[in-house]
Image (spheres, grey):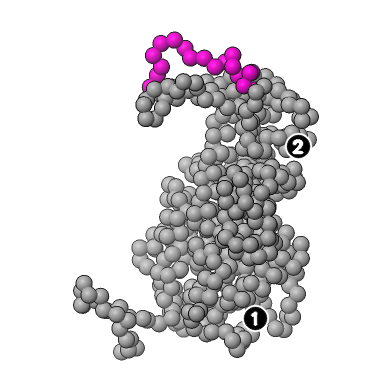
Amino acid sequence: MGEHQGNLFEPQFNRSVKVQSTDHRITSHAGVIMLRDAEHRLGLFDAIAKDVRDPRREDRIRYRIDELIRERVFAMALGCSAQDDVDRLAHDPAFRVAVWNRTGDAVADERLASQPTQSRLIGILTGQAGNLEAVRNGLAQSVQRHVIASGGRRVNQATVDIDSFPIEVHGKQHGANYNGYYKKTVYHPLVASLSVRGDYDSTHQGNRLGNGFIHATLRQGQVHTADGMKRFVEKTDDHAHSIAQHVDYRLDAGYTIGSVMDELNSKNRRFVGRLKSNTKLDALAAEHIHRPPGRPPQNGYEYIVELGNYQADSWKHAQRLILVVVDQPDSTTGQLNLMPRWFFLVTNWEEESRDADTLLAHYRKRGTFEDRLGEFNESIGVHLSSQGFKANEVTMLLALLAFNLNTICRGELEEAVGGGWDMRRFVGSVLKVGGRMVKHSRRLVLRIAESAEPLWSMLTERLEGWQVTLPKPSVGQGFQPPPDHAHLREVLRQ
């Protein structure tokens, strides 16, 4: 005989249907167990926590730093970006099992940290500069550990994309300002992402493993696109070369300035970027803008012209300049525009190493990075609502960590199935899976929906193939009782 359950409601469209509330071991986030298995094999959050100085009294700690980071990052990975969401997830059985860094079946009955405790975590991570840098360095560590686990050594060739994007805020957050370009009150962070051989979508070549964000910094809302770029490149380059033997850079027009290109030249780093047009450059291009006689082809024209070396007054070194002319018909009328469009690429690649056509194709793959940046905003949707600037920066870094962890698991699944998955589909089909946690013979059994079994089996097989030495089990530690004000069951705030 099962437990008696009262009806929650009876739908009017079919009176044979009864909706009841059931026991507390049902979860709709079973995939968090898969995230924990991947993170555990990489030893990622343990490594980050070791570099974080915890000012709390050890004899009064219920939640360790790695457990608190794990709870918040896993919540973000599943799309629960608001800090208040952890109050609900603290009672989820799959989250309980995945977050605790302790063994045994008691983890299923111990509620996790609440929103106020997570706020104190942010205070710990921002209390000292070293703690903030530990989280920031975790971005590159996640990619590096995955690369080593997948192949046992650094990749041969990788490309780094650097860009900024707006994070809109609604309030009086420190450092958030009105940005005239975006016409919103925003933060204007700078991020660097690494892709193997420059293509985030090259699943058919087995090159997607090892992609992800490796460096990021939060900036005030009104700063110029390239503000702080020189220092940012220095740190990014150190991280990139811990992952790949040879690294090149792709830059948008906002970053092809003298200080950045001179820095990359001084380090002997190859780059290609788009150059903002000006009167002098347009004069150089004028003699090459022409249309051949006769009826134009249906798709218009596109051609590339090598313009030789070019040096602006603020540059220390001359760079190779390439003109790209795009003369395509209007999508509505089907006729060519009055004048063709053109843009310039600037690079320090020698023509013998990469010709103009190869460089243009390589630069256009930057669009796959912009797709990933859009996926981050769509699937994680970081909300920066703290008043303090550093608190918002830590929140952003944790969100990027969550995206990297999702990217690692998604990439492995793509290698297994041989096709591409967008992040929303991956989260919905693999992570947001229904399940029930059952205690049996002092063991915890998670019974998941049958529809998820094929994908889980393929992903599990990939994780088990990683070349890693599994970390030793943590030293047994009992559970400190929760504080008196803690709710052992979920309650709704007034």
Q: Quadrant location of the N terminus? A: bottom left
Which mark is on residue 108? none
**Residue 481, quarter of the rendered image:** bottom right
Which residue is found at the position 58% from the left and 39% from the top? 197
The residue identified by callout 1 is 62
Q: Residue 113 colored magenta? A: no
Mark 1 residue crowding within 10 angstroms, few (<14) / some (14–19) / many (20+): some
- Callout 2 secondary element: helix
The structure residue drawn at horizontal position 43% and vertical position 79%, both measured from the top left corner, is 25
Give the residues in magenta: 281-298
Q: Name the residue nearer the viewer: 53 or 383.
A: 383
| Classed neighbour count for the residue bearing mark 2: other residues with Cα under 10 Å, few (<14), some (14–19), many (≥20) | some
Residue shown at the point (76%, 62%) measured from the top left: 129
Q: Where is residue 156 drawn, in percent x and y?
A: 64, 41
Left or right, residue 462 beside residue 388:
left
User: Percent x, y for residue 24?
Assistant: 43, 81
* Amino acid type assigned to the residue bearing label 2 in the image: Ser
**Spatial distance from mark 1 to mark 2, Cα to Cα?**
49 Å
Q: Quadrant of residue 343?
A: top right
Q: What secondary structure is found at the residue carrying circle 1?
A: loop
Is there a contact, CB below 8 Å, between mark 1 and mark 2? Answer: no
Which one is in front, 305 or 335?
Answer: 335
Residue 280, horizontal then vertical, whole percent: 67, 21
**What type is the residue that disc 1 sits on?**
Arg
Q: Which residue is mark 2?
A: 259
Give x and y (percent) for residue 171.
Answer: 60, 62
Q: Residue lying farthest top?
A: 293
Residue 476 can be seen, yes or no: yes
Q: Nearer the viewer, mark 1 or mark 2?
A: 2
